[in-house]
Amino acid sequence: MKAFFIKEPGIITLQEIDEPYMGPEDVLIEVRYLGLCGSDLNAYRGLMPLVRFPRIPGHEISGTIVDKGNAVPEFLKKGDLVTVLPYTNCKVCPACRAGRPNTCQFNQTLGVQRDGALTERIAVHFENVYISKLLSLKELALVEPFSVGYHGINRGHVTENDIVAVSGCGTIGMGALFAALRKGATVVGIDIDDAKLALAKKFGASYTINALKENVAKTIASITNNEGVNVAVESAGAPGAFVTALDIVCFAGRVVTIGYSKHDVTINSQQIVKKELDIYGSRNALRVFPAVISMLEKKEKPYSDIITKIFHFKDTPEAFKYWDENTSGVSKILIEM
């Protein structure tokens, strides 16, 4: 079968690979849509330190079950439409012992530390497979990135009393926005692209700020009566956005950093002490796939509008090139298999 590899930065090649091995507890999935993640783009650019080349990218998956091992439970059936939890955990490291396998010390995410799903078929342990009878294959491909943002909001202990600023309104940021709104919070969307901000407003943000056109700190001060937001979520992976988060969060506030910065961040640690801030790292997603699937199944918002462009599998190199050249204007690219 065929798979696309990032052979080296900027170079994507199509190769023939062996069919996946399917153990007795595995499910064989025909991949139907694959979402490209920021980690995939950074790998393509040679800026993802966790990736070793050559690597098959891709971990935002939707597909159809085409076969299953003899020890797979009956509730998973051939023909089911599914998405996949793409992480691994060792069950024995400090994070796993603390009940946080999403940040397992030895985690291997599909397409990052191990080969991913930009191929025709993959075999996955049944415990990592999630079904929906109501979602389309396009919607199922959005579950994982929305879950990453959703988990970030859980990390920040967001409540209905909070004003939450989300910096970076791409797919993961929008997942954070959706989760904050579901918890009853007031949301401020911050980005440098007006189209993404328009989406944030469409999906329920009370305020939006273009960081290239406005002074973010002054605008936040006017929104919050000079107090600052209760929770600042950084999902852009930009050093400046993290610094801004410390500026705009209130005293005794919470900062959640989801974005994976490619550069070191210089911060004023006095702000952290003076404001007595809680700062939370947020990695992958913990036990939120069912909540995100339920949210999407309610069809309360046109969630698929987050999709910027769909490329066919054979045009995968063009998809990466397009995103590399139009970074700020892309929310989500899907590869249709």
Image (cartoon, rainbow, N blue to C red):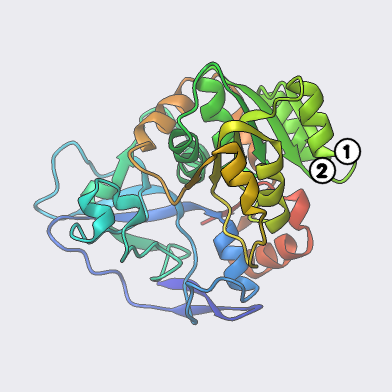
Type of amino acid at the residue the image marks with label 1: Glu
Question: Who is closer to the viewer here, 45 or 260?
Answer: 260
Name the residue located 86 percent from the left edge and 46 percent from the top edge: 212
Q: Position of residue 77 (x, y in %)?
A: 22, 41
Residue at numbered disc 1: 214
Q: Secondary structure at mark 1?
A: loop
Question: Residue at 14% of width from left, 48% of height from top?
Answer: 72
Residue 226: x %, y % from top left: 76, 25
Looking at this view, is 301 or 90 the one in front?
90
Quadrant of the image occupied by residue 132:
top left
In the picture, the disc for residue 211 is 2
What residue type is disc 2 on?
A: Ala
Which of the two residues, 238 or 226, is positioned nearer the viewer here?
226
Residue in view at x 78 percent, y 58 percent: 326
Which residue is rendered at x = 49% and y = 74% of the image? 51
Please state, as top left, top right, bottom left or bottom right, where the N terminus lies in the image: bottom left
Mark 2 crowdedness (10 Å alpha carbons): few <14, some 14-19, many ≥20: some
Q: In whole angstroms, how far apart are the C-alphas of marks 2 and 1? A: 5 Å
In the rendered image of this protein, does residue 289 appear above or below residue 242?
above
Q: What is the x, y in percent for residue 37?
A: 56, 56
